[in-house]
Image (cartoon, helix red, strand yellow):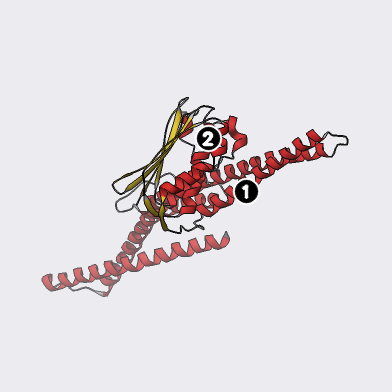
Amino acid sequence: MKKSKYKQVLRAINNYLVFFLIVAFVVSCCMMLFVSVLADTMGLVFTKDNIAAAAKLTFGNVLLITIISATIDYIRRKRMVDRPVKQIMDALDQVMQGDFTVRIPPVKEFAGETGFNQIIDAINQMTAELRGTETLRTDFIANVSHELKTPLAVMGNYATMLQKPGISEEDRVEYAKAISHSSRRLAALITNILKLNKLENQQIFPQLDEYDLGEQLCENLLQFEDIWEKKNLNIETDIEDDVRIRSDAELLSLVWNNLISNAVKFTPEGGTIGVSLKTEGNLVIVSVSDTGCGIRPEVGAHIFEKFYQGDTSHATQGNGLGLALVKRVVDILNGEISVQSIYGQGSTFTVKFRR
């Protein structure tokens, strides 16, 4: 702190000396020119006493003008430089301490002085982004902790019940199945978290190959045959023949599996699931529709967020990462995904890619 004040004093003295030398040079030159003109035009003769008196007066003028100029410059620096710099430094200190709510008010602009407000706008934007990132990180940790805790608690409870003496064979099988189901759910959660992390950090690079997209859709749909037959669902397909694209088959398979899985999960018994594939010019359009519960408008705005589950009645069948994975994969492959839904009637997810 003392060192900083010492530097400020030295800077003030240095500024004053600079002003003094500049003013002394200018005033001296002006006086010499004035005296020279008078001597040449009016034939005036200056005595030693007159020159000494003029020199003292000139020195006094130089001193006065220097003080006035230095004071004006000091006030200007305080208002136009030191104050904005202090505001910026104080805000950055708060950011370094983890406070991302800080915002710097814009400073009053003078002629030609717009640089500080540009810096302030950039810092305010940075803190807003950091606050959003911090909120996402906090929410992610909270959601992961909750999702991990639930299956672990189930496994722990049923494991404790298995240790009780004299339990029947039927109960033992039931408890073992519950533990097995929770362990699979836990494994699926961890797998999806790892996949999403790699996708978001661009650690998974698309392997582009040409293949038949219609054939892939049929294969993915058939993976859920047992489930749709059990629920007596109607399957409607409208898939164009020989639609070939150049993309990453493994990543796109993740997209179709998640969309079809959600359609099967949210469609009640006797409902209908539709899968269509068509081309429009150089666009390939895939739609997965269902006659399930639909999505409320306020829910639809968040369905692609991590761990968001609009219908909590199906929470035990998923972990809220499926559509986040889908959105990230579609973005990486330079595609578009959208959803149209009527609450209580069903939803249609549409994915578009360029050939």
* Label 1 sits on residue: 190
| Residue 171 x %, y % | 79, 33
Q: Is mark 1 on a helix, strand or loop?
A: helix
Q: In which quarter of the image is residue 168?
A: top right
Left or right position of 287 against 56:
right
- How would you rate the neighbour count of disc 2 (Cα within 10 Å): few for under 14, some for 14-19, many for 20 or more? many
| Residue 108 x %, y % | 36, 46
Amino acid type of the residue that numbered disc 1 sits on in the rendered structure: Ile
Q: For this rendering, which residue is in front, 140 or 306?
A: 306
Q: Is mark 2 on a helix, strand or loop?
A: helix
Q: Is residue 211 above or below residue 188?
A: below
Residue 264 is labelled as 2
Mark 2 or mark 1: whose residue is earlier in sequence: 1
Report the residue at 59% width, 29% height from top.
Answer: 313
Q: For this rendering, which residue is in front, 285 or 152?
A: 285
Report the residue at 35% width, 63% height from top.
Answer: 63
Residue 258 is labelled as none
Amino acid type of the residue that numbered disc 2 sits on in the rendered structure: Val
Report how far apart the C-alphas of labels 2 and 1 lie in the structure. 23 Å
Report the residue at 60% width, 36% height from top.
Answer: 317
2 and 1 marks in contact (CB < 8 Å):
no
- How would you rate the neighbour count of disc 1 (Cα within 10 Å): few for under 14, some for 14-19, many for 20 or more? some
Q: Is residue 22 above or below residue 349?
A: below
Left or right position of 105 against 266:
left
